[in-house]
Amino acid sequence: MGILIYTESDNGKFKKSALELASYGRTIADQLGVELIAVSFNHKDSQTLGHYGVERVIQISDPSLENFTAKPYAANLAAVAEENDVKLLILSSSANAKYLAPLLAVSLSAGYASNVVELPEYIQPLTVKRSCFTNKAFSTCILENEVNIIGLSSNSYGIRENTKEIVAVDKSVTPRETNLVVENIEKSSGEVSIADADIVVSGGRGLKGPENWHLIEDLASTLGAATACSKPVSDMGWRPHSEHVGQTGKPVASNLYVAIGVSGAIQHLAGINSSKVKLVINNDPEAPFFKAADYGVVADAFEVVPQLIEKLKIFKNS
């Protein structure tokens, strides 16, 4: 019996969410006195996971799994769970994980709680706290199935080192017929991905045009942040849709969210409410975003952002 986590990676490097899942799973595994197992796809350097509490990693490598497709990934994860008598699976809250979770729940007759924000209050029955109503409230969810799945909300637990001796085991792919072929995956142009970022710098129509986007990129580079945008910006083609955050875009749960020239429509706010601190820069004092902001600056972004970048660079070099 053990706890299983699904570790996501990008360009041969584990995502921050994978390390957070390992930290979270390690704490529960210690409470239950069971093994913490991880599954990785097409990733051979698994020793990193051992620093965060994983004791065994099952490595599945196959060219057909180079790009994420939900059904074959779910089939392989379900096979690992059944072979190892896993009673608890832990996934992230990424878009890919949210595709996987219902498929796994059906395959394993498992209960599923998404957007979990804390360690379980009870293990039997599994009782967890989760965010709901676009992060405006919390609910207590009780799962009474023999097998259960937790979807951990990003940045809700953090990364904690707990080094264990790790054993890597190669496993052959579980065959599954599929007609789906992934021909292209759109990537964000930023150096830091939105899902893994501690800081996100976002721009809206207040930037007036794509030629001014260097303000967002320069500030993000100075802060080591990911770049993002509002829906109108991506709809107008100023930025790729992969950078669109909000209710209909990517959810953001960063430690700091900086919104520049973003009015703050309700759909945008719904997607970024999980961010811990929200800083808004806008020249319109009546912008709706100010009501949700922790800090607000009423000013012309073209004047204040270059000054902010200059001050931050001086601070970093001091």
Image (spheres, rainbow, N blue to C red):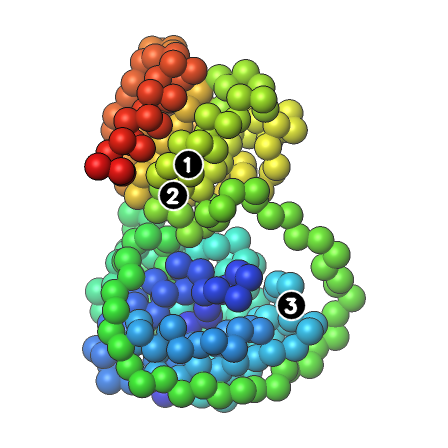
Q: Is residue 146 visible?
A: no
* Image position of 240 (left or right of 86): right
> Residue 34: x and y, percent?
29, 85
Q: Circle 1 — which element?
A: helix
Q: Residue at x 65, y 29 (%)?
A: 237
- Mark 2 and mark 3: span between their CA atoms? 28 Å
Marks 2 and 3 close (CB-CB < 8 Å): no
Which quadrant of the figure has residue 271?
top left
Residue type for callout 1: Ala
Q: Circle 3 — which element?
A: loop
Which quadrant of the figure has residue 42?
bottom right
Marks 1 and 2 close (CB-CB < 8 Å): yes
Q: Nearer the viewer, mark 3 or mark 1?
A: 1
Residue type for callout 3: Glu
Q: Residue at x 27, y 38 (%)?
A: 316
- Mark 3 and mark 1: span between their CA atoms? 30 Å
* Image position of 205 (left or right of 180): left
Q: Residue at x 31, y 74 (%)?
A: 51
Which quadrant of the figure has residue 175?
bottom right
> Residue 191: x and y, percent?
49, 46
Q: Which residue is mark 1?
A: 220
Q: Which residue is mark 2?
A: 224
Q: Is residue 300 visible?
A: yes
* Image position of 45 (left or right of 239): left
Local crowd at mark 3 within 10 Å, few (<14), some, or many (≥20)? Answer: few
> Residue 82: x and y, percent?
50, 85
Residue 66 numbered tag: 3
